[in-house]
Amino acid sequence: MDLRNGLRPLGTTPDEFQRDLLSNLYYRRGTTVESASAQDAYETLALTVRDRLAERRARTAAAHYESNPRWVYYLSAEYLLGPQLEQNLLYSGTTELAPAALKTLGFSPEEVAALDVEPGLGNGGLGRLAACLLDSLATLDIPAVGYGIRYDLGIFKQEFDNGEQVERPDDWAFQGDPWEFPAPDDWQMVGFYGFLGPEGWVPGEVVHGEPSHLLIPGYGTETVNIVRLWRARAARASFDLRRFSAGQYAEAVEEAVRAENISKVLYPDDSTDMGRELRLKQQYFLVSCSLRDIVRRFRFRNADWDDFPAKTVIQLNDTHPTLAIPELMRLLVDEEKLEWEHAWSLVRRTFAYTCHTLLPEALETWPVDMLGRLLPRHLEIIYLINEALLAEVRSRFPGDLDRVRRMSLIQEEPQRRVRMANLAVTGTFAVNGVAELHSQLLTSTTFADFAALWPDRFTNVTNGVSPRRFVRLANPGLSTLITSGLGSDAWLRDLSLLSGLAPLADDPAFREQWRTERRHAKEALGLGDPGAMLDVMIKRFHEYKRQQLKLLHVITLYHRLRDNPERFGVPRTVLFGGKAAPAYYAAKSIIRLINAVAAAIEADPKAYGLLRVVFPPNYNVTLAEKIIPAADLSEQISMAGKEASGTGNMKLALNGALTIGTLDGANVEIRDRVGAGNFFLFGLDTPAAAALRASDYRPRTYYDSDDELRAALDAILSGAFGGVGQEVAHSLLDRDEYLTLADYRSYVDKQDEVAAAWEDQEHWTRMSILNTANSGFFSADRTVADYLSRIWHASPVRLS
Ligand code: 26V
């Protein structure tokens, strides 16, 4: 069969590219060179690049249809895809063609590129991981589809007003999104509310899910996969003309607005009670649309339900899509009329679940009342699953009532709630944590009871990151140097090849080039003096991540330079980046205090040239790509046992930053690989931290016995930073849930070692090169390979 279906690849010469650009400008934008705006030029360029990928997409789809493969479906409420233009230029081989063609037509490539908006459809690590995994799935030629929600408003834009975080709506697609293909004819119907009648569930409200897809090209291969994002629409043209004519304009569109609210906004946190039901609706909306689409795709080439688990694996990205388990039971039992046991056996062989946290408060539960009202049949199915689960527990552990209570899908006290993590573990054949330590802690704490019942279900898949986006695109200068050092760019598809750089750490000429590239990246970032050490902490704000510990160190450095400027030593720029959940007041106070300390230091001439704190607002993927190549020191200082993995730690190490960190998450594995001598370890480990927490921990004893710590906290309390941050200091002194004061001395002393190491730039550069050379393991390609061999068992399909 001709997989090309008569398609010819689009041209790769400058003339051909320019002709396509012009033709798209005329026929798809409907304008001319003379009257085109920068936005016209941007969208035309996007279409021209997208066409090149679409042609590969068509061939990929044909090859997939032909081979009727086993599919990997990734269900995620979040994707942080990052800006699309540069990546799609690289993956379509048009990085040089495009700017040249734009210039010939009289457009400024820089101005055009600046119009590329990143779709911020995620909060942080979990959403970015989903994007990196899709990139690697395509690069490894695995038939895969990502499913998600096309939020109208992504993660809020962060601004600072008088140092305080304010949130602005992110209407990322307001101008339209030239990268996506809407497919309104592929809509699905989703029911909510209603009642259980003799014929089963009768929904009381129905909305439509309309999909659009984005192309996910593989690197160095022909495969182009897709991510399919659902948008909620009113089921009918629900405009009420009668009300409109009566002047009731709001009421006339009420139904449409209610439906469309489902995909209106990404939830920036799980911590508010407001709108919780809307979030549950979002979750079911994603699950219901995606499962129907998966079943539809299964039926293209298959007729027998018994083949479903062999042809389908559905990965649940955290518990957000866990309703997929009762939903598939409902489809099989109520609609397909399969026996319960038969259906359960198919379901249990289809789903797998990734857990991304260790915080007990982050494990999702839903009030039984709410779930029963919104999805009465699903609650009934959950009860039936629970009965079988608890029967199994009772027969394996007779008389252990406490165990039954802990493992139940229903929490009874203080309020009846459905435990989504328990449901996810019960309805899947594989459960994984995201770093070695995390996976161990899951089976020894969070899921200990389930691991006792089903030990084989639990495994680890350590996270990874896309070397294309976070090295090649983010850091082109260093990438060129790596390629010349290794004699090939094959490392972009096999990151373990970076180990070939290790011998070059001993080559003074290579070290000089390495420093030059890193300096260029700092100059390009343009924050602070390029000669100073750039010390970065970039991640969501959360007390367990301990931005407050970094801040206490900054205040300590400031005190030292005020007391003794001649002996200060190494000049530093400390960079913070990150957002706090809008309702997370403690985290917002820390942000406010950082900005106040930054201002105080900036205003003090003594600090000039020695210490500077910068906090660019609105940290996102676009900003990360600028900061990471410039960073010298990577702050990974969470309380041990709290950070599931971290992925920023990997991105920074790969780009040659040295890490100062605790033995938490993937830091453990980074240190194992780069070598203890090339990693600045400090602080309590997980058992020591847990023991201290469990004992009678008194943060004030650390305050009383450490002069520098006391001075730092006293400065905050005495109003040295404009009276800001008292509540931060009080919370540390009174409670200090994450042992910041206990780890302070160890941290500050280790930072002194960092400064001493920086003084020997030759040695520092050696360590930097060795960090890059030994971090090849942290490629998302390796992560996907691990998912394939441990969980997915799917095979590549290559285009001929
Ligand atoms: C959820 C919640 C909800 C309620 C209160 C506070 C809170 C804090 C954290 C979370 C977890 C959100 C899920 C998440 O983004 N986890 C991150 O996943 C990354 C990819 O696996 C991993 O590298 C990070 O360590 C992990 O925090």
Image (spheres, rainbow, N blue to C red):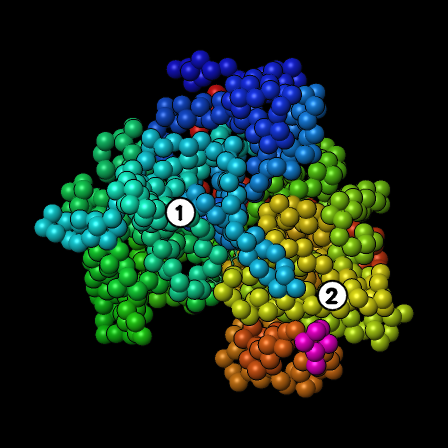
Q: What predominant SS class does the magenta segment belong to?
A: loop
Residue 722 highlighted magenta (yes or no): yes
Q: Which of 393 and 285 is in front in this view?
A: 285
- Contact (Cβ within 8 Å) of mark 2 with mark 1: no
Q: Is disc 2 surrounded by few (<14), some (14 to 19) or many (20+) residues within 10 Å?
A: some
Residue behind mark 1: 263
The type of residue carrying mark 2 is Ala
Give the residues drawn in magenta, as a range: 718-723
Q: Where is residue 632 in the image (x, y as percent from the top left)?
A: 74, 54
Residue behind mark 2: 599
Residue at image x 65%, y 15%? Answer: 15
Residue at image x 70%, y 20%? Answer: 104
Q: Nearer the viewer, residue 15 or 783?
A: 15
The type of residue carrying mark 1 is Ser
Q: Which of 631 and 202 is in front in this view?
A: 202
Q: Which mark is first along the chain, 1 or 2?
A: 1
Q: Position of residue 646 (x, y in %)?
A: 56, 56
**Secondary-structure class at tag 2:** helix
Q: Is residue 359 visible?
A: yes
Residue at image x 75%, y 34%? Answer: 484
Q: Nearer the viewer, residue 105 or 771?
A: 105
Q: Is disc 1 surrounded by few (<14), some (14 to 19) or many (20+) residues within 10 Å?
A: many
Residue 561 highlighted magenta (yes or no): no
